[in-house]
Image (cartoon, rainbow, N blue to C red):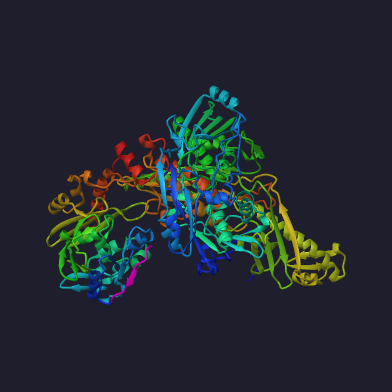
């Protein structure tokens, strides 16, 4: 780790001010990507702005029929929240499959989506449910938020404050973990929402994406068999020592089927 | 609390201390004035070092020293020795390239240490390490075992080993084997890979060196598997100082698995730094460093040929292996594929003619040495896979083929064609018991049901035998102190197995004293006179035997004093339950009363056990594996193991050893893959993000039981159990996977059999739900 200045602001406004004053600063949420990166000396921020002391960023509540999860809410709180289990149980399930208990007690939804790791779980839920990302200055639709590998629509000094999930008719997430890291090698989030069927895939490609061909097929017939007629293009998918692009393409279909079956209960 | 004897499932006495964070591992020590050592390591698999500029690093804040090999040569540090050197079959000596403590002129694997930096803090040392400028000229490399001896393969040691061959080693009767194979009715061959493994000890390697100018003595605190060998090699071979000028200490150790036996370059460098700077100097490996610079295990490619007569009895076995030693000869590197494993290639079978020939090769990879099992897993995997394969090729049930070829109990003691004498064992009984406990009769129904759920179920059996507890002697000293304490000094080294408990149990029984009164003192060359360390599952069978002899010597000594105290003839004194009594009366004195009478420190006794022969633990693993057809994901559904470890000291500790070994064996079979990229020579699996270690959730509950068939050569009747699980598991798991896929014509799968490999195979075969 290289030396840096540590800040622990008490409000979002103060955190934003720090980001503006220190162009080389990084935000610290749960730290599950940032801290290992720092320890391996792969990043050298001048300042760390710890969001852990900002009470307004934390918590889960209902708001006009939608579920609002504060950006600094740890995965474990989502996993065990009665409100989440009652309203969108797929989110509790997804949160419970992230990492291990230590990770779930520290890692946050805001940190996960702002980092937009191609193998993170949360982007699949945010995109799959057509959620809205709330920041210190605006609201960003999920479809506009995830722009590329580790890239988002966030401005350099912008802070995610919450994610607003509309309540779907039904939804489910199925994940095939990377055998070593247990990140998603392929994760598929399927939802039937008031705005139509949405399918989001994480882990398989450089960035979370919607599988529109399957969305169309499911709109006609929300059943596992609908997957059979859909082709997943492997040429766009990742290939590494753990899985070829072909294997990932195949797993997208298998996980989609499992998610659909699970959504149907 | 109580007296616990041999055979009782006593809970580990070290656990309250360890699970409440009171363990003392290397990095827990921070004496005043501590300085930190960091190594600059090669980023290349093979390169010539054209120039090293340490100027900027030397000038960096907090830097105390920056050394290259030239500095250490000037200081008189010798190379790291290899202590297992052999001759080729033609009598020529094996290649013996030198391993300097830092690279000299050339680097030979990614992670090869090049420059040592010592600074006030670890961060300062790392900062300075980044300022070291090394001008490398990359050279071509070879990292694959099977390609090492190809005519166009780049050379690791062009002068010493012009064809990358370090050694050819042979055991058995080549002529008899060729003749028997020529006459055989059937011959079956199988070529298999025994995958390279990274030990991944939970506590990474580390050391803390200190120097006392007044006595001109160095102290090294190090995570080791035995302090005495470490001291001898460091003092005599590397530092070239009298051994009494160096004290080696080991406290708690978070796993070693064979890897922590060896002297690594960082230890003499830290010692030299401590005496030069007159400061304590610590080095602790980061996890990434451990992946690169620990010794690795296994890495063989082997072809086994079995010859059978018309009744499918084996007439000959030939195993020809290529073993990767890495870029340098590690301390015992050449021992593992030769003497350690070579004798075990006939397994539990009555094979009249056998030949094992291994070609040890150099590659541009981390040095390879012992890893849990050390040579025996390679042998057991080769023979158990080859036999299973032969059964499928010859159209006979693999279990039936084993039954037909076992060494029978009536043949014991049985001398194998490779020259070992199995003293005891009942292989057929172990197999039948394992099959029964595994409910093999119910397997066809379970297979049908799994198939309905889209899963292919396979059953695998492996009967292993291994060699333990032979080799050098071990000594122990027991003190019975007037204050009611018993102290044992022994030269083996706990790495987490539970030695404190095990030895206390032996002494509690032998001396009739409370378990809690026994203190086990290990891991300090100043306190323990001698020792051979822990390795080869020897601590309890050999160290335990020495402990018993030492306890007997104490009792013998005490008996004379007790006779005096009781004014009776020594012949009339009996010892039981911690008391000496005049036979036929209730007049007596306790052991501790006698110790008080002896005065001073009380009584002591010494014992040395020299094993007359190795022991041969053996057993049978039965595994059911399910493959999810849709994803290729394999899961272990049932695991049954029946072992013969001879007499059992503590069933609880024993189960722990077996469970851990099986987890590591399952890891080798299904998960752990060490990938050096052939193109770049980089270690692609250099962290837990890519190197898959088994987790608790990867394993089912293990049905472990044992038969106690005492060793006839070990004083305690014990056979050793530390490595067995890791030896039996890989062939059993792979046999099960092949069984699951046999209906599609699959005959062999190389380890690790990952979900990705299984899915690609299922796709090739056109198998769908």
Q: Which residues are magenta?
A: A1-9
The reply to whether residue B274 is visible in this rendering is yes
Vertical comparison of B82 with A83: above or below = above
Residue B435 visible in rendering = no
- In-image side of B383 versus A146 (left or right): right
Residue A63 in magenta stretch: no
Image point (65%, 57%), residue name:
B491
Task: Give the left or right position of residue B456, taking residue B212 as reference.
Answer: left
Q: Quadrant of residue A85?
A: bottom left
Q: Is residue A5 magenta?
A: yes
> Where's residue A5, x and y in %?
33, 70
* Magenta-colored segment: predominant secondary structure: loop
Q: Nearer the viewer, residue B282 or B552?
A: B282
Give percent across and percent down for residue B201.
49, 55
In the rendered image, the quadrant that contains the C terminus of chain B is top left
Residue B755 image position (x, y, % from top left): 35, 46
Measured from the top left, where is residue B352 in percent x and y?
A: 60, 30
Instruction: From the viewer's side, name the closer residue of B170 and A92.
Output: B170
Task: Please state, as top left, top right, bottom left or bottom right, where the N terminus of chain B lies in the image.
Answer: bottom right
């Amino acid at each position: 780790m290289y030396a840096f200045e540590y800040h622990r602001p008490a409000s979002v406004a103060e955190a934003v001010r720090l980001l503006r004053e220190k162009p080389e600063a990084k935000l610290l949420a749960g730290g599950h990507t940032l801290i290992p990166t720092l320890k391996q000396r792969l990043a050298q921020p001048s300042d760390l702005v710890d969001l852990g002391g900002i009470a307004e960023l934390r918590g889960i509540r209902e708001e006009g029929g939608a579920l609002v999860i504060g950006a600094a809410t740890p995965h474990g709180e989502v996993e065990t929240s009665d409100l989440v289990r009652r309203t969108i149980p797929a989110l509790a399930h997804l949160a419970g499959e992230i990492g291990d208990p230590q990770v779930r007690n520290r890692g946050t939804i805001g940190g996960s989506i702002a980092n937009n790791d191609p193998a993170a779980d949360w982007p699949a839920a945010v995109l799959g449910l057509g959620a809205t990302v709330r920041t210190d200055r605006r609201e960003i639709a999920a479809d506009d938020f995830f722009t590329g590998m580790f890239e988002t629509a966030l401005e350099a000094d912008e802070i995610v404050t919450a994610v607003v999930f509309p309540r779907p008719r039904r939804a489910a997430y199925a994940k095939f973990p990377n055998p070593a890291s247990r990140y998603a090698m392929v994760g598929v989030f399927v939802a039937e929402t008031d705005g139509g069927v949405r399918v989001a895939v994480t882990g398989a490609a450089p960035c979370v994406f919607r599988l529109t061909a399957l969305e169309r097929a499911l709109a006609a017939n929300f059943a596992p068999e609908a997957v059979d007629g859909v082709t997943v293009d492997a040429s766009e998918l990742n290939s590494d020592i753990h899985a070829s692009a072909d294997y990932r393409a195949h797993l997208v279909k298998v996980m989609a089927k499992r998610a659909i079956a699970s959504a149907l209960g | 609390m109580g007296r616990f004897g041999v055979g009782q499932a006593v809970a580990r006495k070290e656990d309250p201390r360890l699970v409440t964070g009171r363990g003392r591992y290397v990095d827990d020590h921070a004496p005043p004035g501590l300085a930190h050592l960091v190594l600059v390591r090669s980023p290349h698999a093979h390169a010539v070092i054209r120039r090293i500029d340490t100027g900027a690093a030397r000038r960096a804040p907090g830097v105390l020293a920056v050394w290259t090999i030239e500095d250490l040569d000037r200081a008189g540090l010798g190379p790291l020795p290899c202590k297992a050197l052999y001759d080729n079959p033609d009598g020529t000596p094996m290649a013996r390239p030198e391993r300097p403590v830092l690279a000299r002129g050339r680097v030979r694997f990614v992670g090869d240490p090049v420059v040592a930096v010592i600074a006030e803090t670890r961060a300062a040392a790392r900062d300075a390490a980044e300022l070291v400028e090394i001008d490398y000229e990359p050279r071509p490399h070879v990292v694959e075992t099977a390609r090492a001896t190809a005519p166009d393969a780049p050379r690791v040691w062009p002068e010493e080993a012009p064809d990358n061959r370090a050694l050819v080693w042979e055991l058995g009767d080549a002529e008899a084997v060729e003749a028997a194979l020529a006459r055989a009715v059937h011959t079956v061959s199988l070529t298999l890979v025994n995958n390279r493994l990274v030990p991944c000890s939970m506590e990474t390697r580390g050391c803390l060196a200190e120097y006392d100018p007044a006595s001109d003595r160095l102290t090294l605190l190090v995570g080791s598997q035995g302090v005495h060998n470490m001291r001898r090699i460091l003092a005599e071979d590397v530092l070239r100082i009298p051994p009494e000028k160096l004290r080696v200490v080991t406290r708690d150790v978070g796993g070693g698995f064979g890897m922590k036996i060896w002297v690594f370059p960082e230890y003499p460098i830290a010692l030299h730094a401590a005496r030069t700077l007159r400061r304590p100097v610590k080095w602790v490996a980061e996890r990434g460093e451990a992946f690169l610079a620990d010794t690795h295990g296994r890495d063989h490619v082997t072809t086994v040929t079995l010859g059978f007569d018309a009744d499918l009895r084996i007439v000959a076995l030939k195993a020809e292996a290529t073993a990767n030693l890495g870029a340098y000869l590690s301390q015992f590197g050449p021992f593992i594929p030769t003497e350690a494993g070579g004798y075990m290639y006939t397994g539990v079978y009555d094979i009249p003619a056998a030949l094992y020939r291994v070609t040890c090769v150099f590659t541009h990879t981390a040095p390879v040495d012992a890893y849990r099992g050390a040579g025996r897993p390679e042998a057991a995997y080769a023979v158990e896979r080859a036999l299973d394969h032969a059964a499928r090729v010859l159209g006979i049930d693999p279990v039936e083929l084993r039954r037909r070829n076992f060494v029978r109990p009536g043949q014991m003691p049985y001398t194998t064609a490779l020259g070992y004498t199995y003293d005891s064992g009942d292989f057929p009984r172990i197999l039948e018991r394992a099959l029964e406990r595994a409910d093999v009769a119910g397997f066809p129904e379970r297979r049908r049901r799994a198939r309905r759920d889209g899963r292919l179920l396979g059953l695998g059996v492996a009967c292993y035998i291994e060699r333990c507890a032979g080799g050098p002697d071990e000594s122990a000293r027991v003190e019975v102190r007037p204050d009611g304490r018993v102290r044992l000094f022994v030269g083996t080294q706990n790495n987490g197995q539970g030695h404190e408990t095990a030895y206390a149990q032996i002494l509690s029984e032998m001396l009739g004293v409370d378990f809690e009164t026994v203190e086990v003192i290990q891991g300090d060359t100043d306190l323990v006179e001698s020792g051979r360390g822990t390795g080869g599952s020897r601590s309890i069978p050999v160290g335990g035997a020495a402990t018993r002899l030492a306890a007997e010597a104490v009792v013998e000594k005490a008996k004379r004093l007790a006779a005096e105290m009781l004014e009776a003839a020594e012949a009339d004194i009996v010892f039981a339950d911690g008391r000496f009594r005049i036979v036929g009366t209730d007049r007596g004195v306790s052991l501790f009363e006698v110790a008080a009478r002896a005065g001073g420190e009380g009584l002591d006794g010494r014992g040395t056990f020299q094993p007359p022969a190795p022991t041969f633990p053996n057993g049978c693993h039965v595994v059911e594996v399910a493959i999810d057809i849709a994803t290729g994901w394999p899961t272990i559904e049932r695991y049954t193991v029946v072992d013969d470890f001879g007499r059992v000291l503590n069933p609880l500790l024993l189960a722990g050893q077996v469970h851990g070994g099986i987890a590591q064996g399952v890891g080798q079979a299904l998960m752990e893959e060490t990938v050096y990229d052939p193109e770049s020579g980089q270690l692609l699996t250099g962290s837990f993000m890519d190197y898959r270690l088994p987790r608790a959730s990867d394993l089912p509950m293990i049905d472990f039981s044992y038969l106690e068939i005492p060793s006839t050569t070990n004083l305690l009747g014990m056979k050793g159990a530390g490595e067995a699980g890791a030896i039996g598991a890989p062939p059993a798991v792979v046999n099960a996977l092949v069984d699951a896929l046999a209906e599609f014509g699959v005959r062999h799968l190389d380890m690790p059999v990952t979900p990705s490999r299984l899915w690609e195979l299922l796709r090739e075969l056109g198998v769908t739900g």
